[in-house]
Amino acid sequence: MSWIALILTLLLEQVRATPSANPVYAGATAWADKVARNLNAGKARHGGYGWLLVVGLGVLLTLAIFELARSWFWLPALAVDVFVLFFALGFRQFSHPITQIQTALEQGDLEEARRVFVQWRRATDPDFDASELNESEIVRQSIEFGLLASHRHVFGVLFWFLILPGPCGAVLYRLSEYLARHWNRPAAAGDLGIPPDQFGQFAQQAYAWIDWLPARLTALGFAIVGDFEGAAHCWRHLNVDSRPNVVAERTLILAAAGGALGVRVLSAVDTARYLDPAAHDGAGLAEPAPEALRSAVGLAWRAMVLWLLVLLLMTMASALS
């Protein structure tokens, strides 16, 4: 049933993308802000209590609804799976903006590409400014932001959806990723985000543990469906901590994607900091060009097809055993 739910959700999303403004997102944000306002005393342990209230309660509520639906019939349980996945997955959230940016650049309209990119980024970073970015940097950051979004909205969700019963894993991953960002972003005037104190540390570390294996599977998927030798070369020469760490996992995904595409996806600063010069030269990474945008979307699509095929084979093997 998991495979059927995923296929139905992906088809539904192609017909109607998940709206950015919807009651599910609004409710999760309001609950996270209320928990933070009441529990934030500036200590990491308070953030742990808050994390359990938001993520733990969300997972338990989802499990209760799923089990109730399954006790009636398999069809209501499938409907619960699809409903949760529709709001947890989001392939179009990055593929369509990248396509729009590429079209604008191919037409020579850099300002339109910049406008689309800024609108896309400000959905999660209201203060983002791209006025100083040139074409190459807009392309690079679009690929970077898009591939990270594909991991956080598709591959990470997919992994935990398959690990935990029903759609609980999808809820666990999406809420964990959201709190790691929302409770650690700088405070702004009139913003409900949490000030940079210790309250958000638990959420960030919890997400790092939850994302440790999915990040490596995403990097492996990019390597398999792209230039495997290039991705493996960059992965092997990456200087990051192997322990769960949000920065390390982000860097690993982008380094492997860059090697798979043959394009520098990491920023110049991160390339110098985390990637040996031998890796950049040996993998033949080119500077970002507009054509790389199409390649990045194709890489994500092929990786998704790969994991769907793996899931299908696992489902068939389980049915035959």
Image (cartoon, rainbow, N blue to C red):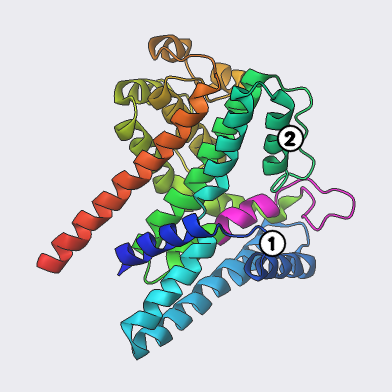
Q: Please tell me whether mark 1 sits on a helix, a strand or a loop.
A: loop
Tell me: 232 left or right of 296. left
The outermost residue toward the left is: 321
Q: Residue at x 55, y 36 (%)?
A: 99
Give, as a three-letter code, the residue at label 2.
Arg
Of the 4 image quadrants, the one containing the C terminus is: bottom left
State the residue in front, 256 or 200.
Answer: 256
Give, as a three-letter code, the residue at label 1.
Ala
Tell me: 309 left or right of 99. left
Q: Position of residue 76 (x, y in %)?
A: 40, 82
Residue ID for mark 1 = 21
Of the 4 image quadrants, the one containing the N terminus is: bottom left
Which of label 1 and label 2 is nearer to you? 2
The outermost residue toward the bottom is: 72
State the residue in front, 238 or 95.
Answer: 95
Tell me: 139 left or right of 221. right
Q: Is residue 177 magenta?
A: yes
Q: Position of residue 19 (x, y in %)?
A: 63, 60
